[in-house]
Image (spheres, rainbow, N blue to C red):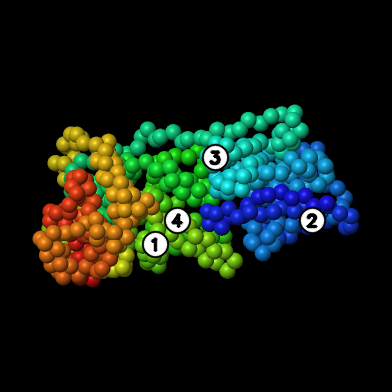
Amino acid sequence: MVVRVATVAFEGIEAKPVDVQVQIANGNVVFTLVGLADKAVAESRERVRAALVAAGLALPAKRITVNLAPADMPKEGSHYDLPIALGVMAAIGAIPADALEGFTVLGELALDGTLTPVAGVLPAAVAANMRNHGLICPAACGPEAAWASGDMEVIAPRSLVQLVNHFKGTQVLSRPTPAVRPPALDMPDLADVKGQESAKRALEIAAAGGHNLLMNGPPGAGKSMLAARLPSILPPLTPQELLEVSMIHSVAGQIAGGELTDRRPFRAPHHSASMPALVGGGAHARPGEISLAHNGVLFLDELPEFNTQALDSLRQPLETGEVAIVRANHRAIYPARFQLVAAMNPCRCGHALDPGFACKRQPNERCAAQYQARLSGPLLDRFDLQIEVAAVTAADLVLPPPAEGSREVAARVAAAREIQRARYASLGRENVTTNAAAPANVIESVARLDAGGTALIRDASERFGLTARGFHRVLKLARTIADLEASEAVSRPHLAEALAYRSGLTGMRRAA
């Protein structure tokens, strides 16, 4: 007799069905596990053996064969422990054989029989619900699984014994309730920033349209401080965005306590991050920082200090909104539509733009150009706003805090985003919610220029050497500036401001 238990294997954020088949037969006393399993799955034999002993059971002195079907699909992770253990228990009659029908099972076993959290519970729960299955998972993951559907049966025991008692009817486990992470009370506020009015304006525009932003300025000017306050003016995630973000974080094992939040992700990796750390990869094709920042912000401080190859690997995801990680036995596609915000110093010492400063090694322009040459032109071309952040003077610091903070700016950003959402929904583009994500042909139709605007952008294209990508990004930026003013038409002042932000590093690029 073969006992079957349903579980899943992960390909990106997709949960593929896996059939755990357990057979106990006469023969040599051996516990064999087949089905293209990795080291973590192979080691489950010892965890299952110890957990069963802790529950008062012993493996029979027979040949135990566990097959993970389909056999040609790679299996990795410790979440196969629980389905294997339950399959063995059903095969020896410790639990009813039909108790596991209609359930998808995943969970890791400790040696004392308790269940420990595993990654990927939310995608597994969504896949189980689509198959009209219930879900059995560790208690710590129950609040996360409960988000998949209010009608799906979710059993979340703390231990193997508790689950057995539930099947026997001696202990009834209640359905877990979805958990929500409480909002942060100490979120940085724009009211903390004194001076830098032009940089605040650029930050507001970037937030309103989801545009990429590059800040260039001396040390201590407040670039990192401004970037840290960007989440405080971004609107909360929509339900669809929340599901996408949570599934990525679930696969990465970064949902603590099963608590979901509608705050947009803000990822700020150190400049020593490698290319696999940024775009994803490794032996098991795990999601990288750009996927963990999906529908949120990726902040790269000290941009030129990052590895050049790692930075250039961001170019394709910035255009497509996804990244395909391909390995010898893995291929995973992760969503990666993120807003890139970066900060950099003008040169190695950081003072090339200071009035009266003269570099001792070479002219300021050459020193700054050599430092910026670490960044490729195609990468810089993907920044919609490129601004210079001047140093804050003592006169600015002694002023009282500004009257306008993040709450007022967030209201304007939310209004502009709602205009964009309604606009693209009326055009049948429900998947486009910001101007930055709009295709080129769509942005041309929603940002029509009058004769004066057409002449302005033609002259600017020749003067600044705008690429086709740069041309359309200027249109997107001008459309966002008009949306902040609730203007239906993109006028010449909107376009002029967009071009001013776009040309921030043109001189430095030419010098390089």
Identify the residue under disc 2: 65
The amino acid type of the residue labelled 3 equals Ser
The residue that appears at 29% across and 68% down in the rendered structure is 377
User: Few, some or many C-alpha atoms within 10 Å of disc 1 (few <14, some 14-19, many ≥20)?
Assistant: few
Residue 335's tag is 4
> Percent from the top left, x then y, of residue 230?
31, 45
Q: Secondary structure at mark 1?
A: helix
Nearer mark to the viewer, of 3 and 1: 3
> Percent from the top left, x then y, of residue 118?
60, 46
> Percent from the top left, x then y, of residue 286?
52, 57
Q: Secondary structure at mark 3?
A: loop
For marks 1 and 2, give the CA distance: 45 Å
User: Few, some or many C-alpha atoms within 10 Å of disc 3 (few <14, some 14-19, many ≥20)?
Assistant: some
Mark 1 / mark 4, whichever is N-terminal: 1
Residue 144 image-quadrant placement: top right
The amino acid type of the residue labelled 2 equals Thr
Mark 3 / mark 4, whichever is N-terminal: 3
User: How many numbered badges does the structure rendering display?
Assistant: 4
Mark 1 / mark 2, whichever is N-terminal: 2
Q: Secondary structure at mark 4?
A: strand
